[in-house]
Amino acid sequence: MANKSFLIKTTNIVWNLFMVGICALLTSGILIFLLLFVKFHLITLPLYLIAFLLIGPTMGAIFQTIFKMLFETEIRVVRKYFYYYKKDFKDSLKLWIPYSVLILILCADIDFLASSEKGAYLLPMLFLILLLSMISYVYSLILYSRFIIRMRDIIKYSLYLVINRPVQSLSIVILIFILYQSFKYFGNFAIFLGVPMFAACTVLLVRNVLLQIEMKYVQ
């Protein structure tokens, strides 16, 4: 009976991840269309920038929906996803903008230094900052999904967690690498299941940290 219950629960989680992936594909449609059919150059740059910024609301909706899915008994995943996407569109965008600007600058610097001999010694440091930024953004999404606090406090606490939770941070690095491999082998359609699975794994990974934060600061 216990095995049957576990099987049903696991099947529900997989199905819900599947549905979140479909929703993510829909809200990421502009970016996927551009990557598949529109060549990147100066004229199309504004379209790519808009699509890149829209990653924020999509990621916010993914993490919030999965957080509810994992810690509440029953939710209507599709309805919840689009509810969060619409309701928190501006806030998710505000959270993503500083990270997106930093990531774009770092990627541009890395690309420039990689194609020139000068300053090549800076590449490891830039890669490290880029990786730390990604980890911080993941923490930010999780904190944003769990607590109602100011954006600057979310970013501040996420940076604190990057340094003070080395085991979880290293685990997130591994998950980021796995997600990168999924995009490498499955292309943009890794958004379909790779990103929801990544979100679920990271949320479960830091759930004890969230409990500690709640006990220390909220209560």
Image (spheres, rainbow, N blue to C red):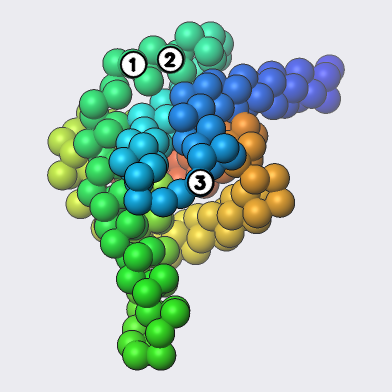
Residue 86, image quadrant: top left
Tally of numbered discs: 3
Q: Are marks 2 and 1 in contact (CB under 8 Å)?
A: yes
| Residue that mark 1 sits on | 86
Residue 179: x, y in percent? 59, 50
| Residue that mark 2 sits on | 82
Instruction: Give the residue drawn at x 54%, y 14%.
Output: 77
Instruction: Give the residue drawn at x 15%, y 44%.
Output: 152
Q: Depth check: give the residue in front, 72 or 3.
A: 72
Q: Depth check: give the residue in front, 153 or 112.
A: 112
- Say if residue 71 shows up in the picture: no
Helix, strand or loop under label 2: helix
CA separation, marks 2 and 3?
30 Å
Q: Depth check: give the residue in front, 167 or 119.
A: 119
**Which amino acid type is marked by label 1?**
Lys
- Say if residue 198 shows up in the picture: yes
**Image side of residue 81 versus residue 192, left or right:** left
| Residue that mark 3 sits on | 39
Residue 44: x, y in percent? 38, 42
Residue 149, image quadrant: top left
**Which amino acid type is marked by label 2?**
Phe
Foreground: disc 1 or disc 3 = 3
